[in-house]
Amino acid sequence: MKATPPLPSLPRPSVPLLSYVTSTIGRKTLVAITGLMLFGFVIMHLAGNLLIYQGPAALNEYAAFLKSKPAVVWAGRIGLLGALSVHLWGTLSLAARNRSARPVGYRMRRTIVSTLSSRTMVLTGFTILAFVVYHLLHFTVGVTHPDHHALVEATATGTRHDVFAMVVAGFREPVVASIYIVAQVMLAVHLSHGVASTVQTLGFNHPTFTPLVKRGGITVAVLLALGNGSIPIAVLAGWIGGNA
Amino acid sequence: MRLTLEVWRQLDAQTAGMFETYEVPDASEHMSFLELLDHLNESLVRDGQEPIAFDSDCREGICGMCSLVVNGVPHGPQRATTVCQLHMREFNDGDRIVVEPWRAGPFPVIRDLVVDRTSFDRIIEAGGYVAVNTGGAPDANAVPIGKDEADIAFQAAVCIGCGACVAACKNASAMLFVSAKVAQFAHLPQGQPERKRRVRDMVGQMDREGFGGCTNTYDCEGACPKEIPVRFIAEMNRGFLAAKITE
């Protein structure tokens, strides 16, 4: 048998990986990676939030600790903003492409195995984004309720931001509390598809582990929403901060 | 059986199409769906009307030509079945059935229910083959391939290229098709020399044809008459990154 001549080497791209990140697969991979970063943040955020069940001292001390490390906080904020920007760019540019890939639609279309959450990622994503903007204006910047944001707690050395009182005052308003609860439902729906989807996009699919990842993703999504959503419910019920 | 069909009629790619309603008073439950259309066409021809154009070839579920969206599902309501193997006993007397062509920008309608799927051919031309000189036909079992790997390669190779995955996908994405055509060689020794350039070039051509991206909704897997699993899409995602990194 005649030996096969070696194949010529592949041409080198001018900018490494540029054609990867502009391909549909590459953009989706960036969406998956940034999605996982945001998912990691949401878990850390929940851990911080749950300190409210330990009482004012624990939560306010944690808040003061974060405030004492501005470099870390700002690095995190810039990282999250970057991840969010790439997540949005990837999904929106792909969604526009996906819509234009079917210029004439079906008169009748039935889904076969797809889930509602997988088909509504843009809708749930935008609802969460709108909520995040409101949430930052509410608790971080203090625009929507400046009186709550100005609450301080006396300490041995002076005063510190009373996060506990701010949260309790905010969630005692049923409209505010329901915005937070609805946002958590949307987050759960988004992540119940999103978490398992990132694993597939990053190239892992296994007959045994993929079903576990799917169930695990949904479980974590629901636990996240229950953990966060329990706080406004507990405030409204008077379990946190007592009855108004 | 008495059936009412709403069928997409379109003269050519340039002309706008519309739905026409047809009554079929004497359908048999033993007819395949394509035989129902043959039956309807015979009566249309008798009445001096243009018959409905639709694709078909083998009519035994292995060629990938038939391509009808029946009541909103590519190849109709029966899972793992091409529309030529779908029989009217799956329907009820008096049913109203909507029949549409595959809908995707890269699959323009040629006429009525016939779409142009040469975009798939161009993806295959971009790398869906083994071009290296492998000499004469080797002895059987001269190249040992593990049973598991052979089964996976075969699972991908059963793709008939019908395009139901594209038709079912809410994004009109061709990822299931392309990933099967990549995987059928990626799991065999003969496919190794060109493995990286194959996935790179086929994905590149897929994107150039204007197919949508994958959002992991998996209706493609549900619509596939050969039940090709979406694990090949994950494999292709991995292989495409590996090919690009080492480019």
Image: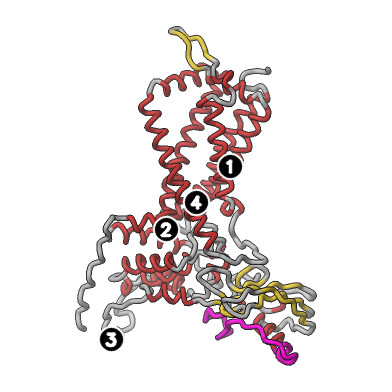
Mark 4 nearby-residue class (10 Å; few <14, some 14–19, many ≥20): few
Front disc: 3 or 4: 4
Q: Which of marks 1 and 2 is nearer the N terminus?
A: 2
Circle 2 is placed at which residue position?
A25
Circle 4 is placed at which residue position?
A92
The amino acid type, in three-letter code, at marker 1 is Thr
- Report the side of A222 relative to A80 (left or right): right
CA–CA distance in space, label 1 to label 2? 25 Å
User: Toward which corner of the image does residue A177 lie, by quadrant?
Assistant: top right
Q: What stretch is highlighted in magenta?
A: B42-66
Residue B71 point in image, percent of width and height: 68, 69
- Report the side of B196 relative to A235 (left or right): left
Residue B83 point in image, percent of width and height: 62, 77
Element under disc 4: helix
Circle 3 is placed at which residue position?
B136
Is disc 3 in contact with disc 1, using a CB cutoff of under 8 Å? no
